[in-house]
């Protein structure tokens, strides 16, 4: 089927699905539909759509000569693909449309500011499935910031997804038996707090916003990570320019250096929950988690300390502890495995002097944490708990493998969803393997 275009909205489509971007709004996705079906995507303001959105310091961003929205006065540096809170659209500098493919390059606006382009570019690659109503979404942020400060890693929306009012049911799986057909959950943000979204850890790596009939759109990532989502407004009604909206976003933690190149991928499926879950199962991780730090931090961030910056150039993770501390504290990305299937962690390190490393782990969030933000915050606050950790000594030397027997600690049991590390300031970590 040939691609149809208008001067402002450009589409790529086939017999299964239609995806459209709006050029005046940074080339963000403003339309997803199946043949004969309605548009799913909400565009009430420029902070919605399906789009790239990133966060870094300073925590209260300002720029001389630029106005900042009072509604977002405390916001950090936050480039988003569509535009800013004053409805200034981000600038598209390149669009290419092919058979089942669409590419767009954007200079984004900083969301809380009035006409303040970010010192960065965003690239988006959309590839339609030729077999089903689905598409792959690949994104890249390339920074060229004049502020060379290394700010702490933050939560990145990969990507942000906003849908129309009929798609008000947020469905996912958060249990400890992924891909076994176990019961799904509907997450409802009925906590009556000011912020409408809730946090969750979907262990199958997907979430979906669906209507009362159980059909809508799902977003899938290749390994389990945190998701944010919920609904704002009147449930069940509203079109693409109305305020009512469902939201969901996979969340990746990342340090966004002044010169970083950050890539990610997500997959979208339009259909019912069964079809979305089946698509996620085809992409389920095979094997146990492993991370390599030859060029990138691979989703690990520093809770305390800094490193020499991006790219890592073979150095590995490690650097300078915060003043007054002798160790760096590192927090790994979410993952999932059962303690009984992997009893140890292997670290490839290099060390100038002998010392010790401590490995922490955390289990799944409490069942109610997905709908009670206070429980989620409490769970996060107990991350680095010595009762859920094991230390291991190591010798001085160049690259060496150190095995940490997590099963030495009786608290290492059940479902595990992530690791953390305390390492001395003269140690670098090159690889981590759960075995």
Image (cartoon, rainbow, N blue to C red):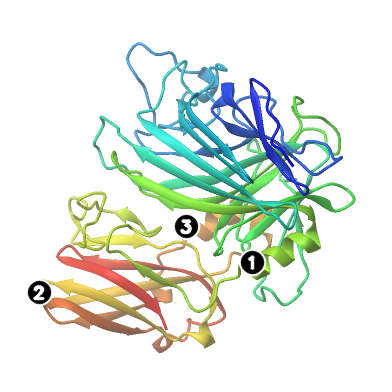
Residue 289 lies left or right of residue 432; in this view the side is right
* Secondary structure state at the residue bearing disc 1: loop
Q: Residue at x 76, y 39 (%)?
A: 40
Among numbered discs 1 and 2, the one appearing first in the sequence: 1
Q: Dot 2: few (<14), some (14–19), or many (≥20) neighbours within 10 Å?
A: few
User: Which is more foreground, mark 1 or mark 2?
Assistant: 1
Front in this rendered view, residue 193 or 123: 123
Is tag 1's residue or tag 3's residue first in the polypeptide sequence? 1
- Residue lying at 30% horizontally and 84% vertically, measured from the top left: 403
Q: Earlier in the sequence, mark 3 or mark 2?
A: 2
Point out the image quarter for the N terminus.
top right
Picture coordinates of residue 432, whole percent (x, y)? 34, 73
| Residue under label 1 | 204
Q: Nearer the viewer, mark 3 or mark 2?
A: 2
Residue 254 numbered tag: none
Mark 1 vs mark 3, foreground winner is 1
Identify the residue position indicated by label 2 in the image. Answer: 353
x, y (%) of residue 205? Answer: 61, 62
Q: In the picture shown, does residue 411 fall above or below 198?
A: below
- Left or right of 309: which side holds 261? right
Rendered position, 400 above or below 52 = below
Report which residue position mark 3 lands on.
Answer: 381
Q: Nearer the viewer, residue 413 or 253?
A: 253
Q: Quadrant of the C terminus?
A: bottom left
Q: Is residue 413 visible?
A: yes
Residue 339: x, y in percent?
51, 83
């Amino acid at each position: 089927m040939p691609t149809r275009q208008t001067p402002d909205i450009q589409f790529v489509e086939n017999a299964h699905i239609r995806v459209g971007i709006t050029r005046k709004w940074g080339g963000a996705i403003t339309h997803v539909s199946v043949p004969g079906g309605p548009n799913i995507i909400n565009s009430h303001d420029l902070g919605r759509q399906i789009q790239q959105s990133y966060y870094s310091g300073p925590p209260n961003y300002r720029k001389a000569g630029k106005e900042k929205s009072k509604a977002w006065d405390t916001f950090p540096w936050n480039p988003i693909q569509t535009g800013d809170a004053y409805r200034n659209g981000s600038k598209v500098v390149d669009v290419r449309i092919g058979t089942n493919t669409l590419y767009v390059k954007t200079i984004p606006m900083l969301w809380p500011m009035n006409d303040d382009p970010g010192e960065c570019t965003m690239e988006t690659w959309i590839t339609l499935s030729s077999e089903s109503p689905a598409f792959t979404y690949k994104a890249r942020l390339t920074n060229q910031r004049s502020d060379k400060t290394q700010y702490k890693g933050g939560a990145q929306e990969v990507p942000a997804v906003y849908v129309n009012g009929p798609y008000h049911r947020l469905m996912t799986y958060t249990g400890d038996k992924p891909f076994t057909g176990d019961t799904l959950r509907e997450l409802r943000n009925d906590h009556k707090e000011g912020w409408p979204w809730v946090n969750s850890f979907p262990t199958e790596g997907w979430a979906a916003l669906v209507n009362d009939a159980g059909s809508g759109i799902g977003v899938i990532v290749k390994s389990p990570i945190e998701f944010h989502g919920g609904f704002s407004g009147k449930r069940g009604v509203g079109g693409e320019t109305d305020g009512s909206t469902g939201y969901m976003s996979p969340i990746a933690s990342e340090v966004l250096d002044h010169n970083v190149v950050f890539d990610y991928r997500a997959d979208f499926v339009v259909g019912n929950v069964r079809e979305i879950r089946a698509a996620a199962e085809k992409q389920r991780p095979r094997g146990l988690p492993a991370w390599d730090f030859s060029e990138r931090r691979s989703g690990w961030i520093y809770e305390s300390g800094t490193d020499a910056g991006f790219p890592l150039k073979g150095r590995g993770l490690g650097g300078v502890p915060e003043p007054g501390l002798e160790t760096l504290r590192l927090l790994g990305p979410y993952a999932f495995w059962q303690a009984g299937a992997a009893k140890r962690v292997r670290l490839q390190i290099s060390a100038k002097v002998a010392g010790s490393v401590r490995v922490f782990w955390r289990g799944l969030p409490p069942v109610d944490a997905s709908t009670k933000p206070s429980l989620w915050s409490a769970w996060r606050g107990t991350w680095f708990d010595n009762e859920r950790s094991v230390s291991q000594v190591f010798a001085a030397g160049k690259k060496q493998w150190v095995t940490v027997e997590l099963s030495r600690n009786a608290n290492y049991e059940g479902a595990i969803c992530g690791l953390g590390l305390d390492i001395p300031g003269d140690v670098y970590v090159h690889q981590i393997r759960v075995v």
